[in-house]
Amino acid sequence: MRLKVYRVGLVVVTLACSVPVIVAAQPRSAVAQVNRAIAAIDAKKYAEAEHMLRDVVKRYPNYYDARYELALVLSLQKKYQEALAECLPLCDSNLSKDSQRDHYFQLLGNLYAQLDDTLNAELFYRRGLKIFPTSARLHVEMAIRAAQRGDLDEALEEIESAISGDPSYPLSYYWGARFYRASTERLWVIFYAELFINLRPNSSKADEMSTIWYNVFREAIEEFDQNGRIILSREIRANAPAGATFPEAFSSTLSDAARILRFNRDFELPVASIDTLLSRFLDLWYERGLDTLYRNIIIERYRHLRDEGLLEAYVHVVAQYGKPMQFAEYAKQNRSQLEKLERWINKHRLVLDRTNYISRYRW
């Protein structure tokens, strides 16, 4: 994590991004040329990359990853029809599964979407899912289309399918946080926004996730002020015992933790108060044995950060775009803590797999 607030380059538009080249017994010289072209794409030297990729595809027409990269660089230059001509053969139903990749179908669907042909866009996403049913990238694309149609429930179903299919795919959490923000399930906004920030430190969309994360906590405390209770999910039953489900356990524990907060209520929630809130939340969560009932890698991360004396710095970094002036003041006075946090994060990168991932449908 860099101190400049979690920023790494990540394209979060619907166009697919370059992926590592699969060698697949291609000549080393061709593989090397494709890798140089990918480097040129990353440097936004699209014409140069196109020239190199056309040369490779001409010499090795069955080098499908090279053809994919050519279609991608054409799309980045808005040469959509040319990109379609290169991408369509990659998704031919006559090709063997071993010759195809899920990102081929993603790019083809995205090209049709760019041309406002939503029928063919969804057709190829679905065709890709028949071959790669656990593809997170294809489920995310289907979620985006469902949301564009106004079908939020279907979009959320697709997001959860994406997460269960591949918990390591960051964009599932980015879009998940955005879509859940439009629902009554604020609990998952907190977790998915934070997961995205951890998985893609410094990304171009981290500021958006940071703002969302802060605002959900702010709204939760405003709700507590009014009702004496925080409810982050519609799945919480009216008279359920505390801890009956994960959403109930989390909301109940957060409500109890909020009772210790003391600040001037004329002002919005200070970032430092979120640190206090989460620290008390941890005490209660572990006292109640909830860590043994519900393993949650983010809550475990809070505990490890607090043990290292870094929870306050972490909270300020995660929430910084929600309250940028407070973060600037904190950074001015706590440079050494932020540097220590950066070293800790670099040593303890968040890795999600099928044993530890966070998902609404998992609970």
Image (cartoon, rainbow, N blue to C red):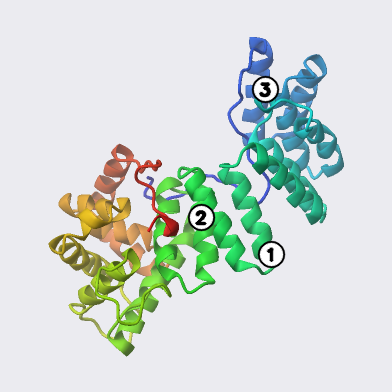
Residue at disc 2, secondary structure: helix
Query: Which element carries disc 3, helix, strand or loop?
Result: helix
Q: CA distance from mark 1 to mark 3?
A: 35 Å
- Looking at the image, tell me whether mark 2 or mark 3 is earlier in sequence order: 3
Q: Nearer the viewer, mark 2 or mark 1?
A: 2
**Are the residues flagged by discs 2 and 3 in contact, CB closer than 8 Å?**
no
Label 1 secondary element:
helix
Q: Which label number is shown at residue 34? A: 3
Q: Tell me: 104 left or right of 354.
A: right
Q: Amino acid at mark 1?
A: Gln
Q: Amino acid at mark 3?
A: Val
Coordinates of residue 159 in the picture (x, y in percent):
54, 55
Label 1 Cα neighbours within 10 Å, binned few <14 / some 14-19 / many ≥20: few
**Where residue 145 appears, x then y in whole percent?**
68, 58
**Residue at the image point whose x is 72% and y is 29% from the top:** 49
| Quadrant of the rendering where the N terminus is positioned | top left
At 60% from the left and 51% from the top, the residue drawn is: 140
Q: Position of residue 96 (x, y in %)?
A: 71, 25
Q: Is residue 96 above or below residue 226?
A: above
Residue linked to disc 1: 148
Asked where in the image residue 148 lies, by quadrant, the reply is bottom right
Quick one: 89 or 334, which is closer to the camera?
89
Return the residue at label 2: 160
Residue at (45% x, 48% y) in the render = 202
Distance of label 2 from label 1 (alpha carbons): 17 Å
Q: Amino acid at mark 2?
A: Glu
